[in-house]
Amino acid sequence: MATKVGFIGLGAMGMPMASNLQRKGFDLNVFDVDASKIETLAALGARRASSVAEASRGADIVITMLPATQHVEAVVLGDDGVLANIDADTVLMDMSTIDANGTDRIAAACRAKGIAFTDCPVGRLVLHAERGESLFMVGAEDAVFGRVEPLLNAMGTTIYRCGKPGMGSRMKLINNFLLLTVAEVCAEAIALGTKLGLDIETMRDVTGATTAQNGQFHTLMVNKVLKGDIEPGFTIDLAFKDMTLAMTAAAEQRIGLPVGAAAHAVFGGARATPYASKDYSALLDLACERAGVEAPRLKA
C-alpha cells in the first residue's frame, strides 16, 4: 500500500517536491492557501484537501513546507492545525526554512503528544527540485529517519544527517547565510568587472577555472539573471528573512558577523526596490544599477 502523505504548502519549492512524490507512487493529499496550486497537483492525480486538518487526517507522514516560522507554527500548533488532527503514529516532517528555536518549539509540542518529528530543510535551487535532485539536511532520530528516507529519495539525490531534531534547521541557517552572502559578493564583483570593461563570458570562464568558482555565479546566476530571468525562484524578500535568521542566531550566541551584517543590510535595502519579489539573483541587476552600468547577459 502506498504511503499516505499530507502535503501542506505548494510554493516554489513545495510544488516540485510534491509533484515528484506524486509521480513516484506516493498517495498525496495536498493543501495550499492558493487553490490553483492544489488543482495543479490534482491534475497529476493527488487528492485535494480543503484544509490543513483534512490534509493531516489519516496520513502516514505530514509534510509542511511553508515560508516562515510564524506560518509553520500557525499550521502545526493552531486550534485546527496539524497536531490537533494528526494520528498518533504519524510523522510530522517540516521541510521549511525557519528559526531553529521555532523548530525546537514544534519538536517539543510533538513530543508532548507522542508524535514523531523531523526537520528536513531543502538545499539547492528550484531547478534541482524540478528534476528531483534536491539535497536535504535532516534532524531526526534513527527510527523516524527510516520512515521518511523513501520520501527524501523520491524528491532528491543527496541526504545529510545533521543530528537530532532541530539540527537540520540549524544547518540550513548556516548554509543560506553562506550562499546569500556570497551571492551579494558575486553581484558586486560582476558589476565591478562590467564597469571595468570585462565581458561576462570572460568573467565566468576565468573565475570558473580558479578557486573563485562558486555556485552563486556559476550555477545560480548563469541559469537565472544572466539569462535575463529574474522571476522567482527564491525571492529577495525570503532571502532577507533567512539572513535575518542567521543574524538573530548570531546575536543570541553573542557572535559578531560583520561581513554577513553588511550583506544583510543590502538585502534589507533591496526590499525597498522593485526587485523585492524577484529572484535573489536579481542582486546583480541592482548592483549594476548602482554602479551605473547595464547588467550583463550571457549570449544565447
Image (spheres, rainbow, N blue to C red):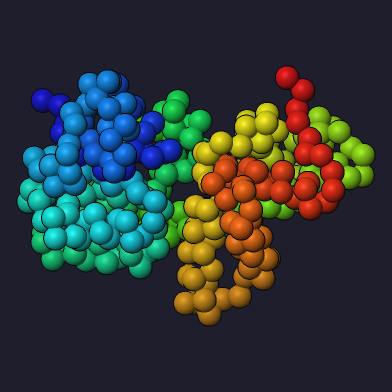
Q: Indicate the position of residue 253 as horizontal and vertical percent values.
A: 49, 77
Q: Residue at x 30, y 50 (%)?
A: 94
View extreme (bottom): residue: 254
Q: Indicate the position of residue 144 as horizontal and vertical percent values.
A: 22, 48
Residue 189 visible from this viewpoint: no
Quadrant holding the C terminus: top right
**Residue placed most toward the observer, 286 or 150:** 286
View extreme (right): residue: 197
Seen in the image, is 101 located left or right of residue 51? Answer: right
Residue 119 lies, with reference to residue 243, above or below; the image says above
Q: Indicate the position of residue 268 as horizontal and vertical percent values.
A: 60, 62
Seen in the image, is 98 located left or right of residue 125? Answer: left
Q: How many marks?
A: 0
Residue 247 visible from this viewpoint: yes
Q: Residue at x 19, y 46 (%)?
A: 52
Seen in the image, is 131 located left or right of residue 26? Answer: right
Q: Quadrant of residue 98?
A: bottom left
Q: Residue at x 30, y 56 (%)?
A: 72
Q: Residue at x 59, y 56 (%)?
A: 271
Q: Quadrant of residue 263?
A: bottom right
Quadrant holding the N terminus: top left
Q: Indicate the position of residue 189 as horizontal and vertical percent values.
A: 79, 48
